[in-house]
Amino acid sequence: MEFSQADFDRLLVAEHTRKTSEVNYAKDPLDAENLTKWGGALLELAQFQTVSDAKQMINDAISKLDEALMINPSKHETLWCMGNALSTTAFMTTDSDEAKVSFDEAAQFFQRAVDADPGNELYQKSLEVAAKAPELHMDFQKAAASQQSMGGASSASSTSTAAKKKKSSDLKYDVFGWIILAVGIFAWVGMAKSHLPPPPP
């Protein structure tokens, strides 16, 4: 996987945020803002991981966001981040019933974020996209199945088997990369807004 300079910069910022949040958590475990930043940083970092590592990182993010919501259940940034985390989890799931449960949960979190901050266009857009997510998920699964069946027509030698596995994992990675990128862009915009320096006096 090749990184652009922008990707590398995002990776560095997310890793710095993760480490800072970890240190701050040791000082004050009841800081919902810090837990939200930590969860957001983990979601951002998940984009740069293998699929299995990304799943673990997203689960860690959900855990941090759960903690933040126990402290402040109406914090709209946290509700929105949780919606993103659950959407990403759903897209990474091949079982459509299981994915639907996560999509429904994500939509509920997006709706709560919209209710808490009705003028936020990003939250509105996330809620709109969430309504289309199950259909997108089905399209991704069909594309993956189609790719696998096309690969299945070749000979059964060990080299073609390795090539099929590579094509299959490449497709899964491409699909996963696209989804996590979309979620990451939303998360990045949200985090960037919360980190803007104050205007000069």
Image (cartoon, rainbow, N blue to C red):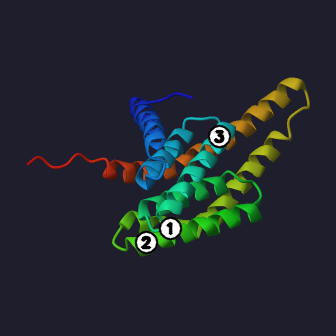
Report the Cα–Cα distance between label 1 and label 3.
26 Å
Quarter of the image with the N terminus in it: top right
Inspect the image, locate mark 2, and give the three-letter code of the amino acid beneath it: Val
**At 53% from the left edge and 67% from the top edge, which residue is drawn?**
109
Q: Kindly state the secondary structure of the residue where label 1 is placed.
A: helix
Q: Residue furthest left?
A: 201
Which amino acid, by three-letter code, is at mark 3?
Tyr
Disc 3: which residue = 173
Of mark 1 and mark 3, the one earlier in the sequence is: 1
In the picture, measured across the screen, residue 53 lies left or right of residue 11, that is right
Residue sitting at 31 percent across and 47 percent down? 195
Q: Secondary structure at mark 3?
A: helix
Within-10-Å neighbours for mark 2: few <14, some 14–19, many 20+: many
3 or 2: mark nearer the eye: 2
Q: Which residue is mark 1?
A: 110
Please determine whether, in this image, residue 41 is positioned above or below residue 86.
above
Residue 114 numbered mark, or none:
2
Q: Verify CB contact (< 8 Å) between mark 1 and mark 3.
A: no
